[in-house]
Image (cartoon, rainbow, N blue to C red):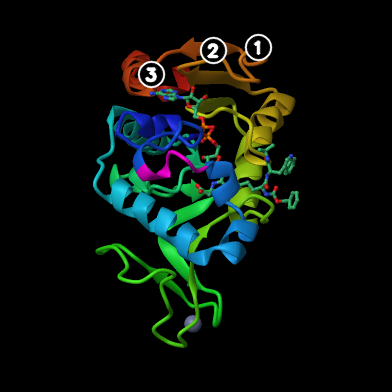
């Protein structure tokens, strides 16, 4: 399971890093809520569209590329490999990972609050904020999961099923503070899986995983994959 730390080396600020420039004075925790959107749809949609354009201008880094490689090696060897992400930047998909379980949605999917129509936004920035639905004129919102919103049932169900059935669980580049995503490592542990964390810093799970690999995901993951002999069963 990955968090914002795997995209840090692509140049995307992590969720809890202060956003630089005009967004520095806002707290992401305050903007990523339905209440903020209801109170100021222009500000919130401008922030999300700014993030969408920033992510579109960044590229996957060796952390994303290594996870794509591992998914291919494990899958072709008949092993199950499930990539779960909390990230909304689509960099795993752009590195070639498929499927990807997106627990918190994506910056590139927008949904009409009037008719519910979902559209993929991969082009230029919106011209007006809040953007409006071509079909009904309703106000569009980003297709991400805000705090106090339920996660997509299919995504969290598949993630919990995979965590509860795995032999090895890697928690990569996440502060392990946002639930229910942060609870997945516990489901793996309960199942008897070996658990490892790759993080630049300590997190609330660092003391309870089997291995805490301290450092940048873009450096540790390629080294880890190197150590993966041809048969991932040794992993
Ligand atoms: C919900 C989308 C039911 C929007 C995000 C217990 C059970 C269930 C719910 C809760 C619970 N306790 C509390 C809750 C409520 C809440 C929650 O968890 N609150 C927290 C703050 C305590 N959860 C929810 O609201 C969830 N909904 O449970 O619904 C419900 C309904 C009503 C009431 C209660 C429950 C919805 C959560 C989803 C919120 N949406 N994102 C957007 O992106 O704008 S979450 C947001 O945080 C991002 O998605 C982000 O991915 C996620 C987690 O953050 P991280 O990815 O970990 O990023 P962060 O910056 O924190 O950390 C980066 C890490 O990387 C750091 O450790 C850093 O050291 C490291 N790092 C940096 N560089 C590198 C690196 N590591 C390696 N290499 C590097 N180079
Ligand atoms: Zn509409």
Residue at image mark 1: 207
Whether residue 10 appears in magenta in the rendering, the answer is no
- Bin the neighbour count of mark 3 within 10 Å (Cα to Cα): few under 14, some 14-19, many 20 and up: some
Query: Left or right: where does residue 28 sit relative to residue 194?
Result: left
Q: Quadrant of residue 8?
A: top left
Residue at image mark 3: 216
Identify which residue is drawn at 50% across, 54% down: 105
Coordinates of residue 189 in the picture (x, y in percent):
69, 24
- Name which of mark 1 and mark 3 comes first in the sequence: 1
Q: Is mark 3 within 8 Å of ligand 1?
A: yes
Q: Measure the alpha-carbon separation of dots 1 and 3.
A: 18 Å
- Bin the neighbour count of mark 1 within 10 Å (Cα to Cα): few under 14, some 14-19, many 20 and up: few
Q: Which residues are magenta?
A: 22-26
Dominant SS of magenta comes to loop
Asked if 198 appears above or below 31 in the picture, the reply is above
Coordinates of residue 186 in the picture (x, y in percent):
70, 28
């Amino acid at each position: 399971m990955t968090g914002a730390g795997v995209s840090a080396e692509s140049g995307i600020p992590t969720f809890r890093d202060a956003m630089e420039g005009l967004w520095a004075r806002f707290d992401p925790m305050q903007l990523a809520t339905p209440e903020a959107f209801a109170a100021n749809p222009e500000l919130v949609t401008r922030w999300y569209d700014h993030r969408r354009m920033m992510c579109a201008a960044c590229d996957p880094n060796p952390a994303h590329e290594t996870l794509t490689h591992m998914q291919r090696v494990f899958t072709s060897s008949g092993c199950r490999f499930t990539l779960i992400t909390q990230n909304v930047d689509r960099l795993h998909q752009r590195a070639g990972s498929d499927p990807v379980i997106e627990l918190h949605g994506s910056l590139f999917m927008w949904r009409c609050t009037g008719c519910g129509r979902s559209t993929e936004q991969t082009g230029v920035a919106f011209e007006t904020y809040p953007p409006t639905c071509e079909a009904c004129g309703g106000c569009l919102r980003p297709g991400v999961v805000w705090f106090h919103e339920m996660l997509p049932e299919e995504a969290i169900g598949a993630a919990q099923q995979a965590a509860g059935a795995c032999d090895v669980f890697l928690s990569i580049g996440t502060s392990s503070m946002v639930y229910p995503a942060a609870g997945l490592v516990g489901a793996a542990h309960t199942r008897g899986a070996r658990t490892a964390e790759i993080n630049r810093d300590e997190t609330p799970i660092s003391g309870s995983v089997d291995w805490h690999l301290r450092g940048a995901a873009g450096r540790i993951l390629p080294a880890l994959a190197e150590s993966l002999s041809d048969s991932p069963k040794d992993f």
